[in-house]
């Protein structure tokens, strides 16, 4: 078994794939900076991927509507996945497949988050629903997804069509504890993972980055063992486990980096572009 040295000095025991035929990348914390900018170097890297003939798919915790503009700017012509893989969309935005949260699990999630004093967002169809307009990170999410939330009195009418329920809190430790407790409570009936330190996502069992990556692999006709994946969040580890080459961003938490084959620089340092230039197109594996 070969040891792999990461750019930040960490060591992995896994041997990365020697043949890469496609790329699947996370969006926030990876392709874009923390203030949601797409740098010129990242644009150039995607252009180089396109010229090389490698398919590039994006997978995000955002709703598909929330990164449609990015797909257009980058001229992505492959299927992409929103809601952590819960909805697979064609290049024109039409839905290829989707997995909704079971109604009872949606009710249980809302009840759990309410009990713990955590703000709740519910995504259903094209809409982002919330009840508390004074909650944290609302303006941040508006800038991220590019549209405004719909304010509702309660979530009752949307619980049968929830694609994602997000627990939102500035108390990162509380959210980490709730992640463990809610995941245990849900078992195999839902997927529970933080997409950011401040966002706890609950989605359908097959709405996770691992299943999403496999669905994208099937759509583009490339074996998972020949796919390179790039991400920074705890929810990205699920796709690390299936890919031929996994690359963690430098801004990822240590536990995420430890699960990757390689670690690039942070999203503030064009780590996404560097991963493509050196590790994928450059072959430094």
Image (tube, rainbow, N blue to C red):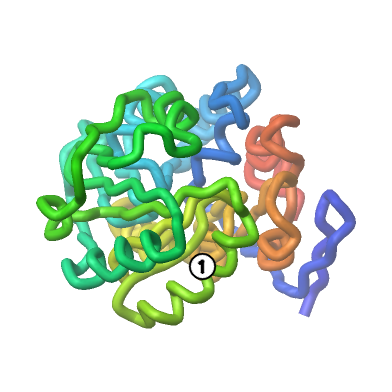
Mark 1 burial class by Cα count in 10 Å: few <14, some 14-19, many 20+: many
Residue 4 shows in this picture = yes
Give the farthest residue toward the right.
9
The residue lying at 89 percent from left, 56 percent from top is: 9
- Location of residue 177 in the rendering, given as x and y in whole percent from the top left corner: 57, 69
Q: Answer with the quarter of the image where residue 17 lies.
A: bottom right
Q: Is residue 171 above or below residue 131?
A: below
Taking 230 as reference, is 148 above or below it?
Answer: above
* Depth check, front residue: 66 or 274: 66
Which residue in the protein does label 1 denote? 178
Quarter of the rendering occupied by the C terminus: bottom right
Quarter of the figure with the N terminus: bottom right
Rendered view: 209 above or below 61: below
- Residue 117 located left or right of residue 49: left
Question: How far across and how far down the image is residue 47, in percent?
Answer: 52, 25
Q: Residue at x 30, y 39 (%)?
A: 64
| Looking at the image, residue 132 lies above or below residue 106 | above
For mark 1, give the secondary structure. Answer: helix
Q: Quick one: 197 or 28, which is closer to the camera? A: 197
Residue 106, given in percent of the width and then of the height, sits at 24, 64
Asked where in the image residue 174 lies, by quadrant, the reply is: bottom right
Q: Position of residue 102 (x, y in %)?
A: 19, 69
Toward which corner of the image does residue 172 lie, by quadrant? Answer: bottom right
* Count of marks placed on residues: 1
Evaluate whether residue 81 shows in this view.
no
Name the residue: 30% across, 61% down: 110
The residue depicted at 83 percent of the width and 49 percent of the height is 7
**On the rendered structure, is 246 left or right of 195?**
right
Q: Nearer the viewer, residue 193 or 47?
A: 193
């Amino acid at each position: 078994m070969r040891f792999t040295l990461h750019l930040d000095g960490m060591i992995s025991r896994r041997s990365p794939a020697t043949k890469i035929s496609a790329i699947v990348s996370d969006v926030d914390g990876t392709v874009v900076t923390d203030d949601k900018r797409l740098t010129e170097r990242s644009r150039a890297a995607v252009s180089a991927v396109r010229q090389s003939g490698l398919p590039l798919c994006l997978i995000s915790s955002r709703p598909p509507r929330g990164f449609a503009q990015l797909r257009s700017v980058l001229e992505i012509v492959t299927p992409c996945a929103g809601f952590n893989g819960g909805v697979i969309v064609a290049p024109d935005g039409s839905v290829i497949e989707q997995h909704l949260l079971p109604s009872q699990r949606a009710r249980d999630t809302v009840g759990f988050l309410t009990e713990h004093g955590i703000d709740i967002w519910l995504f259903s169809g094209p809409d982002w629903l919330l009840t508390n307009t004074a909650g944290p990170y609302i303006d941040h999410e508006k800038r991220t997804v590019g549209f405004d939330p719909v304010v509702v009195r309660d979530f009752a009418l949307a619980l049968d069509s929830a694609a994602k329920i997000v627990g939102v809190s500035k108390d990162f430790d509380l959210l980490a504890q709730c992640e463990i407790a809610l995941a245990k409570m849900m078992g195999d009936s839902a997927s529970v993972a933080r997409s950011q330190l401040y966002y706890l996502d609950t989605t359908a069992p097959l709405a996770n980055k691992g299943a999403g990556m496999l669905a994208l692999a099937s759509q583009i006709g490339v074996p998972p063992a020949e796919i390179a994946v790039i991400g920074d969040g705890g929810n990205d580890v699920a796709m690390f486990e299936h890919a031929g080459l996994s690359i963690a961003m430098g801004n990822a938490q240590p536990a995420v980096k430890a699960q990757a084959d390689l670690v690039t620089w942070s999203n503030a340092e064009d780590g996404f572009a560097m991963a493509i230039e050196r590790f994928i197109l450059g072959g430094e594996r």
